[in-house]
Amino acid sequence: MATPNATMTKFGYPASAIAQTPSWSVQVRPAQATLGALVLVCKEPVTAYSAISAPAHADMKPLVERIERCLKKAFDYDKINWLMLMMVDPDVHFHVLPRYAAPRSFGGLTFTDPGWPAAPNIGFNPPLGATTLADLTAHLKRVWDEVA
């Protein structure tokens, strides 16, 4: 794929990317509804999950497994939510939200999960600043490589 799709760009690609495959982009979600929130964006020009190719489906399983290992190692989440909403951003993508019963810390900040134990508050967006977001992305890239 020569050009990122609109959803990848909206979520900060390429700066937010922690991993790429031919079919998918794994990116840090700039609005950290919970610490370590990611998006998994399909690179194919499709707007329905049923329309992704067989190679994209096959490519997805190992990514899901690695995302969960990465986030577990990085922040020891209690639960994980995978949300496919696609109401605003039409390209096939998932919001990956690690969930926490107790606060977590990163970069001198304390992160809570205001929706716990119910549905996540996807609109929650604590101000991180560009440096903290870049540090979070770098941290998750390092952990991603460790859990290969």
Image (spheres, helix red, strand yellow):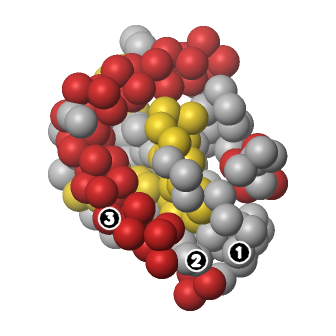
First in sequence: mark 3 vs mark 1: 1
First in sequence: mark 2 vs mark 1: 1
Q: Locate residue 128, reporting x and y percent.
A: 58, 24
Q: Could you give the CA–CA distance between mark 3 and mark 2, rounded to whole angstroms?
A: 13 Å
Q: Could you give the CA–CA distance between mark 2 and mark 1, rounded to whole angstroms?
A: 6 Å
Residue under label 3: 61
Q: Could you give the CA–CA distance between mark 3 and mark 1, rounded to whole angstroms?
A: 18 Å
**Which residue type does callout 3 highlight?**
Lys
Secondary-structure class at tag 3? helix
Q: Residue furthest bottom?
A: 50
Residue 115 lies, with reference to residue 13, above or below; the image says below
Circle 1 packing at 10 Å, graded few (<14), some (14-19), many (20+), is: some
Residue 77 lies, with reference to residue 47, above or below; the image says above
Residue under label 2: 52
In front: 6, or 72? 6
Pointer 2 and pointer 1: residues touching (CB < 8 Å)? yes
Pointer 3 and pointer 2: residues touching (CB < 8 Å)? no
**Which residue type does callout 2 highlight?**
Ile
**Which residue type does callout 1 highlight?**
Val
Secondary-structure class at tag 2? loop
Mark carried by residue 46: 1
The answer to whether residue 143 is left or right of residue 129 is left
Q: Locate residue 64, reporting x and y percent.
A: 33, 58
Q: Quadrant of residue 85?
A: bottom right
First in sequence: mark 3 vs mark 2: 2
- In the rendered image, the quadrant that contains the C terminus is top left
Q: Locate residue 78, reporting x and y percent.
A: 19, 51
